[in-house]
Image (spheres, rainbow, N blue to C red):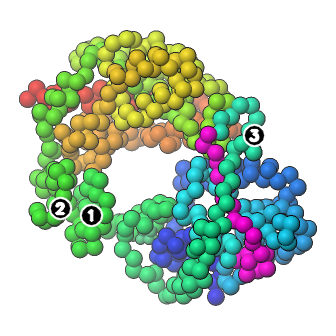
Amino acid sequence: MPTISKSRFKNGLQCHKLLWYTYNQKEDIPEPDAALLDKFEQGRLVGEYAKKLFPDGIEVAKGIVDFAEVLPASKKAALLLKPMFEAAFEYAGAYARADILEPTPGGKWDLIEVKSSNEIKKHHYHDVALQKYVFDGAGISISKCYLMHLNRGYVRQGDINPPKLFVKKDITKEVENILSEIAPNLKTMAALIKRPTAPDILVGPHCSDPYNCPLKSMCWGFLPKNNVTELYRGGKKQFELIKSGILKLADIPDDFGLTNTQKIQVGVARTGKPHINVEGIEKFLASLKYPIYFLDFETFATAIPLIDNDRPYQQIPFQYSLHVLASLDGKPVHYSYLAEGPIDPRPDILKNLKKLLGSDGTILTFNMSFESGRLNEMSRDYPEYRSWYETIKPRIADLIVPFRRFAYYNPDQEGEASLKSVLPALTGKSYSGLNISEGGVASLEFVRVTFGQATAEEREQVKKDLLIYCGLDTEGMIDILRVLARMSNK
Ligand code: SF4
């Protein structure tokens, strides 16, 4: 009988097909990408800070993954009756390793699961329930179950303060409520793993809930171009359509309940021509006032705050690109900023922008909640800029509006209204071929060369790549505006 570990159990709760592959065809599961590896590393770091709350704690078989070594080491460590980190036990075909087990005066243990999130999520309970099932069964009787996650209100000042960094919540009741599901789930999973072929499971919301499934590119590969998963705010509809055998947008029957924007998508898929609502575009253009300031931020957000006045996962701007356009056909003037070294970039950014954004004209962003959110937070953390932010707030506008409202829609956008989808569809310009071609990579690369280990050459290269990438965002916004303006003149 296969032994089911905690991570495999989580795979199995998400999808039986994924579970089957992890045991039978692991070679088909892609290696984690840089973003996922970074997430693992951030989780590891959070775990290290959590251990500091238990100064007399014992590391059990640190860095060892082989059950055969970890299990006896855990049994031996348990005899010392001290907090244990990463102790593992096995019971009824399941295996689990606890972040922290703390002995209680009554001869039992408290189970503490450490999460690098800012809140408790429902799937965390299942994770802890499996552990309680295994440990109780193995003779490590669990008294209380706790979940320790990051405190979103923690503000770093100087060294990290572990007692303030975490929030510890008692989830014993929630875990007990689902404990009876563990044994039947394990039984079903054990039988499934032994099947000669993978179960036939159709794609659905479970492919990204609670995690993005690594097999998505394989399982979703049967979908043709311009398929029903591109439906804007498609929700359950897209999966209902797939279930009924309708895969292409163009094949959705006219009497299927679609929203107006979804009907536009279907029409565009059938004709292959973009949808243009000149009136909608003109209305948007009329709301802008020159000079227009095209603004874009790049940010980093880490589980453990990297600088003072930073909170877990707060988005800290480290770069901006600003193009200023005095008139539609005028020559744009470009300003940019990129933080040098592990400093707090926000005072410089605020000081520069206060000067550069002037007192009149639209500040144009793409998806304004992001840029407005950052300006709002920066002026909260540096209150001397609060009144300035209040004065520029009404000037901030969003170039995504005509695309979100479907005043313009091109089938090449594939149901998206983001800058990365609109720019190539509308202007033919693209980010492909750039060393840094999306915000997540920009953030990882900046943190790596600024706060981590990197050579001077690497730093220089990343700096160049970041300047090109962020500059293209605001340059691209000018191109988009000009194409929209040409459409409105027709
Ligand atoms: S992509 Fe979806 S259907 Fe395929 S294994 Fe993952 S969760 Fe299951």
Please identify the quarter of the rendering in which residue 459 is found: top right
Three-letter residue code for mark 2? Gly
Q: Is residue 435 magenta?
A: no
- First to last magenta residue range: 134-153
**Residue at 33%, 12% in the rendered image:** 360
Vertical position of residue 65 compared to residue 476: above or below: below
Q: Which residue is mark 1?
A: 237
- Position of residue 265 in the picture relative to residue 47 (left or right): left
Q: CA distance from mark 2 to mark 1?
A: 9 Å
| Residue 161, numbered circle | 3
What percent of the width, then of the height, locates residue 18? 49, 72
Quarter of the displayed picture in which ligand 1 can be seen: bottom left
State the residue position of label 2. 257
- Badge 1: how crowded within 10 Å, few (<14), some, or many (20+)? some
Residue 89 in view here: no
Q: What amino acid is at disc 1?
A: Lys
**Residue 278 sits in quarter:** top left
Of marks 3 and 1, the one in the foreground: 3
Q: Is residue 181 visible?
A: yes
Between 239 and 341, the one nearer to me in the picture: 239
Contact (Cβ within 8 Å) of mark 2 with mark 1: yes
x and y, in percent, of residue 29 in the image: 51, 67
The CA span between labels 3 and 1 is 47 Å
Q: Secondary structure at mark 1?
A: helix
* Residue farthest toward the right in the current orientation of the protein: 80
Q: Quadrant of the C terminus?
A: top left
Task: Report how far apart the C-alphas of labels 2 and 3 lie in the structure.
Answer: 53 Å
Does residue 139 show up magenta in the picture?
yes
